[in-house]
Amino acid sequence: MIGISKYIILNIAITLFVMAMFFSCNNNLKEMQDTSITKNEPIGVAENIHLKYTDSGKVKAILKSPIMYDYSNREFAYNEFPDGVYLELIEDGKKNIVVADYGIVYNKTSIIDLQGNVKITTHENDTLFAEQLYFDERKEWLFTNKPVKFRTGSDVTYGNGFDSDKGFKNTEVLEINAILTVDSE
């Protein structure tokens, strides 16, 4: 009988030990998973991007960038273009060009934030210059509250802010500082 009770006590002790190890391993495993990909590190890196987006066999956009960091592993996922972005948007054979020193795309909100020497040139040769510009993909709307220079035709408008639809059909320079007319000759 004493041998059986020692056996039962030994089994209970081993079971408790294994359970303690199991639960402690789960906590350690969770900690290891959290630190295996540092939360400040991107989950992916793409270099020398030259991406062509097509729809119905027609090229609609061309994106070029030296590097892109993919932070889709974060709670507020985003893609970052720290060394600049060059984008051609093509519609009905007409090309608009977007250039910036830095870009970031927020996946959840569909907001694109372009910074540093932002320049948009339309197929009609209207040109917007800004230090920062946002594009809301859902509303298809461009906006900023930073200083801008907007050249359309022979007029150059300087202001502090800009709003426009994506096609530059409904544009407005906010807080206008000056409007200059430039001779085309």
Image (cartoon, rainbow, N blue to C red):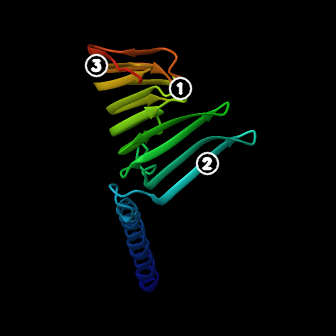
Q: CA distance from mark 1 to mark 2?
A: 23 Å
Q: Residue extending furthest bottom?
A: 3
Residue 116 place in picture, x, y as percent: 31, 40
Does the residue at mark 3 contact the one at mark 2 (Cβ under 8 Å)? no
Please tell me the numbered disc located at residue 89. none
Few, some or many residues within 10 Å of mark 1 (<14, 14–19, 20+): few
Q: Which residue, as the protein is rendered here, is positioned at the far right?
A: 56
Front residue of 151/82: it is: 151
**Number of the label disc, if any, that sits on residue 52:** 2
Is residue 144 at least partly visible in the picture?
no
Dot in front, 3 or 2: 3
Q: Give the residue drawn at x 44%, y 72%.
A: 15
Q: Is residue 172 visible?
A: yes
**Which quadrant holds the N terminus?**
bottom left
User: Which residue is denoted by mark 1 in the rendering?
Assistant: 124
Left or right: residue 49 versus residue 29 is right
Query: Which image quadrant is residue 9 in?
Result: bottom left
Q: Earlier in the sequence, mark 3 or mark 2?
A: 2
Amino acid type assigned to the residue bearing label 2 in the image? Lys
Mark sitting earlier along the chain (1/3): 1
Q: Nearer the viewer, residue 94 or 14?
A: 94
Percent coordinates x, y for residue 131 in the rendering: 30, 34
Q: Considering only vertical position in the picture, is 143 above or below 61? A: above
- Label 3: which secondary element: strand
Which one is earlier in the sequence, the residue at label 1 or at label 2?
2
Q: Residue furthest front?
A: 185
Question: In this rendering, is residue 124 above or below 67?
Answer: above
Q: Nearer the viewer, residue 96 or 17?
A: 96
Q: Which residue is mark 3?
A: 159
- x and y, in percent, of residue 67 in the image: 43, 56
Image location (x, y in percent) of residue 142: 44, 25
> Please, is residue 87 above or below residue 27 in the view?
above
